[in-house]
Image (cartoon, grey):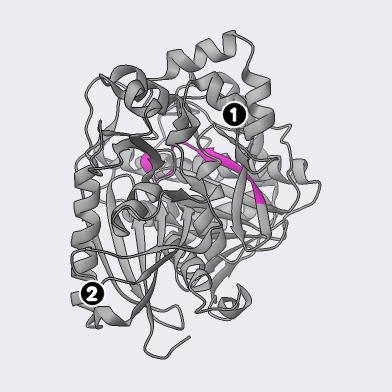
Amino acid sequence: MNAQGHILAIDQGTTGTTALIIAEDLSILAKVNREFPQIYPKPGWVEHDPEAIWNSVTETISEVIEVSGVDASSIKAIGITNQRETCLLWDRDTGKAIHNAIVWQCRRTAPMCAELRDAGHEQSIRDKTGLVVDAYFSGTKAAWMLDEVAGARDKAKAGELAFGTVDTFLTWRLTDGQAHVTDPSNASRTMLYDITERQWSDSLCNLLRVPANVLPQVSASAAVYGVTKGVPGLPDGIPVSGMAGDQQSALFGQLCTTSGMAKCTYGTGAFLLMNTGSELVRSSHGLLTTVGWQVGDDFHYALEGSVFIAGAAVQWLRDGLDLIESAPQIEALAASVEDSGGVTFVPALAGLGAPHWREDARGIIRGITRGTTRAHLARATLEGIALSCAELLEAMQADLGRELSELRVDGGAAANNLLMQMQADMLGCAVVRPEVIETTALGAAILAGIGAGLFEDIEAARQTWSEQRRFHAQDSEDIKELRRRWDETVERA
């Protein structure tokens, strides 16, 4: 890579946007985050103002360039990673959205999904997409907008509307409408993309009533999609050359590039992905089969499982119960006792995802006695997070037919040493934390560098990944007893 070259990584998330300036050795020179409002029109509905998303992107770009001190002309590539299933429709002429973006968390299309299941379409959709039929994914959101926004279907039929997830919308805006494009990792989250055929499915588009002419072109995760034009704070002509959904980007940024490697991102929830290489593995344990990424002709699939509540359980102890004043305090509090005193906490505060898929499940704390203290509750919370993740990794190992040698970790809660040691113990394998835990943005930066020709391939970036700490598994009878109590308590959740 040119010694003066830099990469701009845009990490567009659910609550805000982070922009990073990344140097040739993939070190982070500067990072700026800008939050934007969440919109809740009705219970269970979640939206974003598309202009608020775009403004947060342009503002963080300008700020991060200023903070880094680099010349904007030194930026040689732009990579995008994004909240995945959030989607929107916009007018091709004006670039203006016809409705607020509908966020991945939004449940407004749950009745539509129930109708699809009742009509017997669940298995065929799963066979084509690797997904369960759920309001989480983008296809039914697109159908809702076409149905509910006046004149939208007529405009769509006339070729006047464009659909996309957030990566597609940002690329359109960055290139002044030159590029209407997505990558396979994001396409695979729409419930409209056939992951076996690697293309949009006509039958799924017909079933969900989404006309194919609104859909973006699906290109590789590393490619030049277009160049910047008219973007505040940026010169024209910078290649937009890499994109991947946030969890796949983190898998790539952790350099989990061979089959059997896995990562877990600990945030509000916990997201686990295991690379299955070119093999499309169908889960028999309730996991999702999804696309990892495409670089050239190299196409990777992954198994995915989500723990809906991870860091959010710690936030609940802080905000709901006032047991701690700040989230980082939980580590010292939990470490002040040797064990949880027989307390088990299943943090199903928003139902249970894979491998259970029980949206009616609720959180449960079991085993409280007169001797239970807030420290025991804190420790039980960390154990509950680790055990939730352990269930998913065990399901992945069973589906792939091989044991995990290590789990790479990132996200805010990965800084909690006690939680990471618990995770290693409950998995029975090493947990590895890298020096740089901004792996989602790094994944987008590496993809952009490859797409723009700054790196030949992933090997050029491999030497930049370094291990900060390795947590080795410690087997004990205590772990077996914890797991026994956990299994019993999950049944009651």
Image spot of residue 444 (x, y percent): 46, 63
Give the residue type that dot 2 points to.
Answer: Ile
Residue drawn at x 31%, y 51% is 327
**x, y (%) of residue 118?**
58, 8
Q: Is residue 358 visible?
A: no
Q: Which residue is mark 1?
A: 202
Q: Position of residue 383 (x, y in %)?
A: 52, 44
Say which residue appears at 44% left-offset and 13% top-offset.
111
Which element type, helix, strand or loop, lies under badge 1? helix
State how far apart marks 1 and 2 are (Cα). 43 Å
Q: As shown in the figure, which amino acid type bears the numbered disc 1?
A: Asp
**Label 1: few (<14), some (14–19) or many (≥20) C-alpha neighbours in 10 Å:** some
In this rendering, the answer to whether 285 lies above or below 58 is: above
Q: Is residue 172 above or below residue 105?
A: below
Q: Say whether residue 65 is left or right of residue 224.
A: left
Image depth: mark 1 or mark 2 in front: 1
| Figure quadrant of residue 371 | top left
Residue drawn at x 41%, y 91% is 3
246 displayed left or right of 324: right
Query: Which disc number belongs to residue 175?
Result: none
Q: Residue furthest right?
A: 401
Residues in magenta, as a range: 301-313
Q: Which residue is mark 2?
A: 65
Q: Nearer the viewer, residue 45 or 228?
A: 228
- Residue in the foreground of this view, choosing between 64 and 174: 174
Q: Is residue 308 magenta?
A: yes
Circle nearer the N terminus (1, 2): 2
Q: Which element type, helix, strand or loop, lies under badge 2?
A: helix
Give the crowd class for mark 2: few <14, some 14-19, many >=20 residues within 10 Å: many
